[in-house]
Image (tube, grey):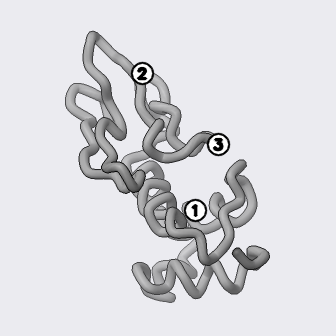
Amino acid sequence: MKRMTRTDILARVSDVTSSPILADVKSAQNKAFKWIVAEDARQLKSDDPDLLQRYVLAVMFYSLKGENWHHGDLHWLSGVHECYWSKKYKRRVLGVVECDRHKKITRIELGEFSV
């Protein structure tokens, strides 16, 4: 895998997000992009197969105001693989609750989680 650059990451996320939305500093997409490039502990390369999945989940987090979730962040935006972005709450697992054998997310449950 090649070295990650901001331009390479921008090219990848542009496949799923339009340029005007990415340029809007108030958008969840812009916040997710900045997080992927500058703050994400995993520091994925632009050709990593998990990059877009991780970006889309970060967009969800910012869109749903994850920083204000009442019962914690479900480990979203942590340094672990996205398949582990979950938390047990009231005897239920919330967040990413199911991934396939290739670590592609197949189910997310926010249920009672206050968003």
Q: Earlier in the sequence, mark 2 or mark 3?
A: 2
Q: Quadrant of residue 65?
A: top left
The type of residue carrying mark 2 is His
Residue 48 lies, with reference to residue 93, above or below; the image says below
Query: In screen coordinates, is 66 left or right of 88?
Result: right
The type of residue carrying mark 1 is Lys
The type of residue carrying mark 3 is Gly
Asked if labels 2 and 1 touch by Cβ distance under 8 angstroms, the answer is no
Q: Earlier in the sequence, mark 1 or mark 2?
A: 1
Where does the C terminus fall, quadrant-wise? top left
Q: Is residue 46 visible?
A: yes
Q: Where is mark 1, residue-wise?
A: 31
Residue situated in front as seen by the camera: 30 or 58: 58
Query: In screen coordinates, is 95 left or right of 10?
Result: left
Q: Quadrant of residue 97?
A: top left
Q: Secondary structure at mark 2?
A: loop
Q: Position of residue 93 (x, y in %)?
A: 31, 24
Q: Position of residue 71 (x, y in %)?
A: 42, 21
Q: In 3D space, how far apart are the residues under numbered discs 1 and 2 (Cα atoms)?
A: 22 Å
Label 1 Cα crowd, 10 Å radius (few <14 / some 14-19 / many 20+): many
Q: Where is mark 2, residue-wise?
A: 71
The disc placed on residue 79 is 3
Label 2 Cα crowd, 10 Å radius (few <14 / some 14-19 / many 20+): few
